[in-house]
């Protein structure tokens, strides 16, 4: 069964850090392009960070604060979020594009709230 399961969301104060995890199963993880997206109610889901085999790319709003990484042995992708701001509050979703990009799957999302 193809599946992505996110974890690590929660409440954090401004300036704090969180690390999100996304555990994958059911496809060849090492060949998949993995990404994190976020969505605020009433707004479109937006790409936050993406990682290929080694290359990474980030939205301008998170460059220098967020780091995406992957552990192919554990079939897991991470999003390390530092210097969090209230505007980072959103539901964060993990996505995989696999089978040479012909298929994709989303996780269920994890809520990150940045507030004092």
Image (cartoon, rainbow, N blue to C red):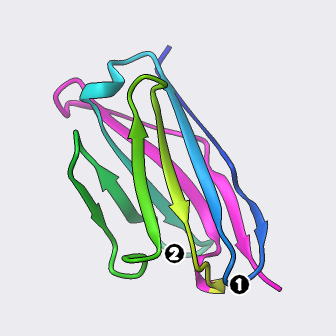
The crowding category of the residue bearing disc 2, from other C-alpha atoms within 10 Å (few below 14, some 14 to 19, many at least 20), is few
| Helix, strand or loop under label 2 | loop
Percent x, y of residue 50: 32, 54
Residue occupying image coordinates x 65% and y 62%: 18
Instruction: Return the residue nearer the eye: 113 or 79.
Output: 79
Q: State the separation of the CA atoms marked 2 and 1.
A: 22 Å
Q: Say left or right for 17 vs 61.
A: right
Percent x, y of residue 36: 44, 54
Does 35 appear above or below 47?
A: above
Q: Residue furthest right?
A: 116
Q: Quadrant of the C terminus?
A: bottom right
Mark 2 or 1: the one toward you: 1
Residue occupying image coordinates x 77% and y 79%: 13
Percent x, y of residue 100: 16, 28
Boundaries of the magenta span:
87-116
Residue occupying image coordinates x 28% and y 32%: 32
Q: Quadrant of residue 101?
A: top left
The crowding category of the residue bearing disc 1, from other C-alpha atoms within 10 Å (few below 14, some 14 to 19, many at least 20), is some
Percent x, y of residue 115: 78, 82
Q: Say left or right for 13 vs 62.
A: right
Q: Say left or right for 109 vs 28.
A: right
Q: Say left or right for 110 vs 66.
A: right
Q: Work out whether mark 2 precedes mark 1 in sequence or the reverse, and give the earlier one.
A: 1
Does 2 appear above or below 50?
A: above
Is 59 contained in the magenta span?
no
| Helix, strand or loop under label 1 | loop
Residue position for label 2 = 43
Residue position for label 1 = 14
Task: Please identify the dominant SS of the magenta region.
Answer: strand
């Amino acid at each position: 069964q193809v599946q992505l399961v996110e974890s690590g969301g929660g409440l954090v104060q401004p300036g704090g850090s969180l690390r999100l995890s996304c555990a994958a199963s059911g496809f060849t993880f090492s060949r998949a392009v993995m990404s994190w997206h976020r969505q605020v109610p009433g707004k479109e889901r937006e790409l936050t960070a993406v990682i290929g085999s080694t290359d990474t790319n980030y939205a301008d709003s998170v460059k220098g604060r967020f780091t995406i990484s992957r552990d192919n042995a554990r079939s897991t992708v991470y999003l390390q979020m530092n210097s969090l701001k209230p505007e980072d509050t959103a539901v964060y979703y993990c996505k995989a594009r696999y089978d040479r990009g012909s298929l994709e799957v989303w996780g269920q999302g994890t809520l990150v709230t940045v507030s004092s």
